Image (spheres, helix red, strand yellow):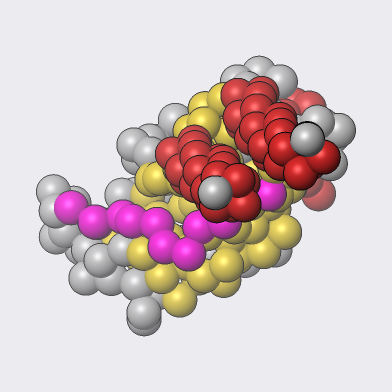
Amino acid sequence: MLKHSFFSAIIIAFLALLAYQVEAAPTISPGTPTTSVPTYLTDGSYLFGITVSLGTDEFLLPVEISGAAGLQNWQFDLLFDKTVVQEVDPGDGSSGIYGAEFTLGDLNSLSFILGGFPFNGLGEVDGVAGSYPSLLAGPSGDGPLAFIAFQFLTGQETNNPNFSIANASVLEAVPEPATLGLFIGGLLVLFGARRLAIYKRKT
């Protein structure tokens, strides 16, 4: 009976921790398209002096995360309707994918873009990835990860590009405090059950 209770406690603690982690997982999603270009992308202070100026029917799509905790690295694929928009590669080495300030006005929170490959024929920007070399602990909370340049195709300006995210993954520095508390609580339950079993065997 004690052995059964011990293993039941292990299963319950594990499932509770797993359920919380799934519920608390950060979410990456497309933001609202904008024609406002952040200052750091217009004044030459961005990587290699790259600047952004939007042409006719062009816009920036922010891709955002919610519920981050010490965010270190992230990656996603961006899907879109190729009959409505196309990704804009200006030929400056950026592929039209730019880092975003997680906290507006804080250049230390600017993401460094590690990858991203536009495939307009497939309606996809594949493997967009970034990190935060200027932030040891990484940012937490909700904020933009990157900006991606797009242009409406002729006559499609009022149609929905149907942006969506696929294959998202994140690496965080530390779990949420509540997750740590749940994990420690589970360990205490397991330890107590084991000690009780040992005590019963000795008496």
Residue in the picture at 72% in, 59% down: 114
Q: Which residues are magenta?
A: 160-171
Residue in the picture at 41% in, 70% down: 124
User: Residue 166: which quarter of the image?
Assistant: bottom left
Asked whether residue 196 is in view, the answer is yes
Asked whether residue 87 is in view, the answer is no
Residue in the picture at 33% in, 56% down: 164
Q: Is residue 169 magenta?
A: yes
Q: Nearer the viewer, residue 96 or 78?
A: 78
User: Residue 80: which quarter of the image?
Assistant: bottom left
Q: Nearer the viewer, residue 197 or 62?
A: 197
Task: Please name the predominant secondary structure of the magenta segment in the image.
Answer: strand
Q: Is residue 96 left or right of residue 69?
A: left
Q: Is residue 82 left or right of residue 199?
A: left
The relative height of residue 139 versus residue 163 in the rendered view (above or below) is above
Whole-percent x, y for residue 20 in the image: 49, 37
Residue positioned most to the front? 203
Residue in the picture at 61% in, 29% down: 182
Residue positioned most to the top? 105
Whole-percent x, y for residue 105 in the image: 66, 18
Which part of the image, by quadrant, shows the C terminus? top right
Q: Is residue 126 magenta?
A: no
Q: Nearer the viewer, residue 112 or 5?
A: 5
Whole-percent x, y for residue 142 in the image: 52, 27
Q: How many marks?
A: 0
The relative height of residue 159 versus residue 142 in the rendered view (above or below) is below
Whole-percent x, y for residue 50 in the image: 71, 47
Q: Nearer the viewer, residue 35 or 23?
A: 23
Q: Is residue 171 left or right of residue 128?
A: right
The relative height of residue 52 versus residue 177 in the rendered view (above or below) is below
